[in-house]
Amino acid sequence: VQLQASGGGLVQAGGSLRLSCAASESIAGLAVMAWYRQAPGKQREFIARITSGGSIVYQNSVKDRFTISRDNSKNTMYLQMNSLKPEDTAVYSCAARPTISGTWDRWGQGTLVTVSS
């Protein structure tokens, strides 16, 4: 399964964006899918993950502003980002794996989100 992230862009602080992570084939067999981001000069950090059963975990800094979801019928995962802040500026990437635990073995090309103040 290949993943492709899209939906990034330039937005003012307080604005919203919705990112998509489209898979090349069915995501039904992907036990966990996740979003990560990497800001300039910083390490990649976990944002949120969602299991095939709908269990969700968020990083604390985005918990009340971002919403992760997945639509198996469209083979796509989403990240709705609201109340964006300049510190949310980063390249956002999606990841997936077929097992609940383990390493991420599928990564999508990132999409750049820039939040201006």
Image (cartoon, grey):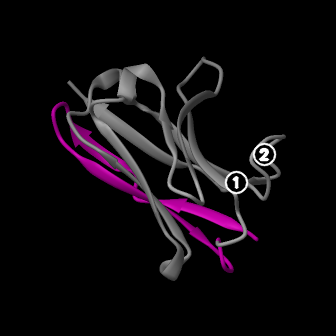
- 38 or 50: nearer the viewer: 50
Residue at image location 47% in from the left, 45% down from the top: 112
Residue 42 % position (x, y): 60, 18
Element assignment for label 2: loop
Picture layout, residue 31 above or below residue 86? below
The reply to whether dot 2 and dot 1 touch (C-beta < 8 Å) is: yes
Residue 51 % position (x, y): 59, 52
Classify mark 2: residues with Cα within 10 Å, few (<14), some (14-19) or many (20+).
some
Classify mark 1: residues with Cα within 10 Å, few (<14), some (14-19) or many (20+).
many
Residue at image location 66% in from the left, 79% down from the top: 26
Q: Give the label on residue 96, or none.
A: 1
Read off the magenta span. Answer: 1-27
Q: Give the label on residue 104, or none.
A: 2
Picture layout, residue 107 above or below residue 103? below
Upstream in sequence: badge 2 or badge 1: 1
In the rendered picture of this protein, how many numbered marks are placed on residues?
2
Q: Does the magenta stretch include residue 18?
A: yes
Q: Is residue 110 left or right of residue 18?
A: right
Q: What residue type is labelled 1?
A: Ala
Residue at image location 28% in from the left, 30% down from the top: 64
Quadrant containing the N terminus in the rendered view: bottom right
Q: Which amino acid does label 2 sit on?
A: Trp
Quadrant containing the C terminus in the rendered view: top left
Residue 50 % position (x, y): 54, 49
Residue 11 % position (x, y): 24, 42
Q: In this view, does 77 lie to the left or right of 96?
A: left
Q: Is residue 21 magenta?
A: yes
Residue at image location 29% in from the left, 50% down from the top: 17
